[in-house]
Image: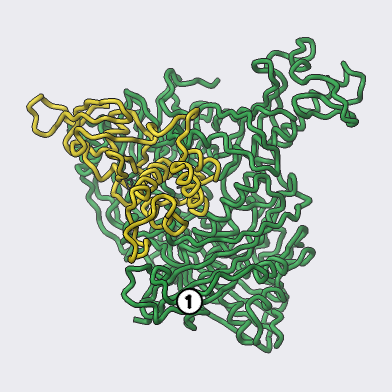
Chain colours: A green, B yellow
Amino acid sequence: MTSIPLTSPQGAPSDTSSAADGRIGENALRPDGTLKVTGEFAYASDLWMDEMVWGTTVRSPHPHARIVSIDIGPALATPGVYAVLTAEDVPGANAVGLEHEDQPVLAETVVRYKGEPVAIVAADHPEIARQAAKKVVVEYDVLEAVTDARAALDPASVQLRPSGNVVRHLKVRKGEELPTAAVVVSLDFEVGMQDQAFLGPESGLAVPAEDGGVDLYVATQWLHVDQRQVCSALGLPPEKVRLSLSGVGGAFGGREDLSMHVHACLLAMHTNKPVKMVYNREESFYGHVHRHPATMSYEFGAEPDGMLVYGRAEILFDGGAYASSTGAVVGNGGTLGLGPYRFPNVHIDCYGVYTNNPPCGAMRGFGCVQAAFAHEALMDALAERVGVSPAAIRKLNGVREGDVNITGQVIDSAAPCEELVQILLDMPLPAERSGADLLSLPGGVANSTHGEGVVRGVGYALTYKNVGFSEGFDDYSTARVRLQVIGGEAVASVHTAAAEVGQGLITVEQQICRTELGVGRVVVHPKNTQVGSGGSTSASRQTYVTGGAVKAACEAVRARVLAAAAQVCGHTADDLALDGGKVVARSGEVVLDLAELLGDAELFADEGVEETVEWRHRPTEAVDPETGQGNAHVQYAFSAHRAVVDVDVDLGLVKVVALDTAQDVGKAINPDAVLGQIQGGSTQGMGLALMEEIVVKDGHIMNPSFTDYLIPTILDTPPMLIKILEYADPHAPYGVRGVGEPPTISSGPAVAAAIRQATGKALRRVPIRPEHITGT
Amino acid sequence: MAALRTGQPDDPTVSTVGIRVNDEMSELTVDNRTSLLDALREHLGLTGAKKGCDHGQCGACTVLIDGRRANSCLQLAVMVDGQDVTTIEGLGAAEDLHPVQRAFLDRDAYQCGYCTPGQICSAVGAIAEAGAGWPSAVTPADSLGIEGTAGLDASEVRERMSGNLCRCAAYVNIVPAVLDAAREVSA
Ligand code: FES
Ligand code: FES
């Protein structure tokens, strides 16, 4: 049975309720909005228990080394220290991971990347814990590190795993083996390592429970997959490891893997005290996976008019030291890596490899972001070669509904490529820069030129992304919905484990309940493992999948309520609906008051009507290992961007003047939230094109701070014209199409294209740095 | 929490400071190295100000010290002895929101909300600075200063709010939120 900790921490999540209006399609306000603007919303870093102690992590200074010995004595002797634990203290399996359990909770005999956890310390103050951590004496025997992904592919290289260095090699083959074409264009492209850089660093609080289990409050994207891994590491059954979602300060993929989860639990169980762990910014750069850096070689063949004949690509992702979700990233890179275009003939090899670099995994756009830079640069090269505009080449080749894509899957809902590009063409362009205004220069007024070398460029990009988990994954979500009378009012409550990370999922859950159950007040239960899995808050899937589960649970509740209503009112259940807190007939006649009906003790128990539903989207298939053919994805989401830039070619500085976009969202459940996702996603994609890179030298991160890892500020973020299309997907609840990732995929390539257009330079690497533009 | 080395009254590594926080006088004994941010969050239980970097790089910890905005992670608690500190908790409550808080809600100028307390405190400070005529880097050089809050436009707001990072990039909505609030504050 579930046991609730005797005292729950300050800042533990509680019910979020709101009676505000807002059904689907309306701009319902976020139920947690007031808490967020008043500073009352508690994030994982705000959790507090008076008796708690603080945990910290000892990390490897080497990218690859054998651990000769660990002496915890001096650390343990530090006054204020409660525990120092190493791999020996992991009671269960010392191996966790999303796809492969290949990552130790604490390194045992070998460290495989710089920053890998080796020991953990608990003390009564965070600074004492950190000082003690420095006293853990680890003797290393440094090994040769593999820090180049290309070298890792070479069988002669050091093999980091018994199975070799390749995590996954996906082949996609379609049509002729060696097709020829009148026009051939090719290029190599390189994408640097991007960081999610969520503003709220990793944190959580583990509380030992009387039943020998543990309660973990944590900021995460997927409670149940965390629970599975924590259970396995602790050697405990799921009922003894209870997770609750604490306030999440952004995620973007970086919280899909474990960070401090098991460490805090181990320390809590060892000390029998609540243990809080909070990473600082530098540690956060080591504490989560990043976006895979990629090197890519592409070749497209086309007819003289630009119609594509074939696409060839070799894509190489550096997965770093542990697999994380590299396999699925390779899946996306391979199956989606040529972009939303019609290719009769295809030959793709997509690899993800182990190295001794920082581990890479999920980040918004997941494998499509990297490939998009290459295929969009190549589409521009093709347009130039055949003498048509970038927009025209995309309109000519863009996939349409009913087409068969490169893995042999029929695209069976809207694929409005042509229309998206046309919308961008029809949008007004920003005014020309006025030469006199020094403030408008790239780099601003502190610029040391007067803009003599400033040129404007315009670039386009068209991309797509799968929504939901693919390749046969059993992708589902669970929702528990209850309708009951509280204070004389019919109130719905909804309980899912699907993580709200700022995207607005709880608003959507409320909107669905209001729409389906016709009530005003909807209580959102805290997210925890006391309900079935909601799946991951990633792959732009929650509105679709958890939205589908909430809708289905509402329908089940409604069916019971209307069946009961039919018994008492003489209408058939089919003739009844719920609206405005009433049971109404199709004719519009108000038949019963819902609160009164629910209050009828003969019909319903006190706790009202409750239904729990596990909901799945239609299944996908694993692709054929030799050809990559198969119905790999459940849905595709399309977006296009147009970027306008001013580039100072003397200084290498870029100012993005406009970043306009069009995207098909199927159905905007909450239009304001859709806009927010598009603005945020566009900005992150622009960041990768212009400034964001974790610089890794010989396995060492050179810039783990916000001084040296730059993310766009409000000054870097241009105005955005946004056009949303709503072509309902007939297979999806309400016709929704995932929203969060597509803008991150199309915005960066559009910015890169605009800079190429302005400068005439090839620019085959992102982020584009000033020296790439000036050639100095 | 066990304070770091509270020691004896004559311990030179600790100090007792008096800070007026959100109109309430607080006396606290802190290790001299305690930042104002940690003093607020860990000694006074005011967790509204957030720690995004602890190095003055993100603005999530912005508070108002004697009415001026500051990164509280870059101030030692002992430096603000005797001063007035306003945090997000002191600006307005759910039933009585400050115009900037209201405008952030209305404009959906946040997503995860982690940067929001800092953004809001920063905006309150920025509006006050404009009200006092302080120029910014984008105020035309030939003017004496900005013409009060009425002189704020999108580019002034962007410049003045550029010390507050938002990784969710709610920036496009933060600009009109600050402009809305500036109009209301000056009205
Ligand atoms: S926490 Fe103070 S500026 Fe980032
Ligand atoms: S709202 Fe998430 S960082 Fe600004």
Q: How many marks?
A: 1
- A639 up-or-down from A49: above or below: below
Asked whether the viewer can see residue A230, the reply is: no
Towards the viewer: A659 or A275? A659
User: In the picture provided, is B165 more to the left or to the right than A184?
Assistant: left
Q: Under tag 1, what secondary structure?
A: loop
Residue at label 1?
A764
Q: For label 1, count other residues whose C-alpha is less than 10 Å away and answer few (under 14), some (14-19) or many (20+).
A: some
Residue at 65%, 45% (x, y): give it.
A670
Q: Is residue A259 left or right of residue B86?
A: right
Q: Name the residue at 61% across, 33% down.
A: A496
In-front residue for pair A4/A143:
A4
Assess mark 1: CB under 8 A from ligand 2?
no
Q: Quadrant of residue A176?
A: bottom right
Q: Position of residue A80 (x, y in %)?
A: 21, 30
Q: Quadrant of the N terminus of chain B?
A: top left
Q: Quadrant of residue A494?
A: top right
At a point 34% along the width and 25% down the height, the residue shown is: A273
Q: Position of residue A14 (x, y in %)?
A: 51, 27
Task: Name the amino acid type tagged 1.
Answer: Arg
Vertical placement of residue B61 versus A716, above or below: above
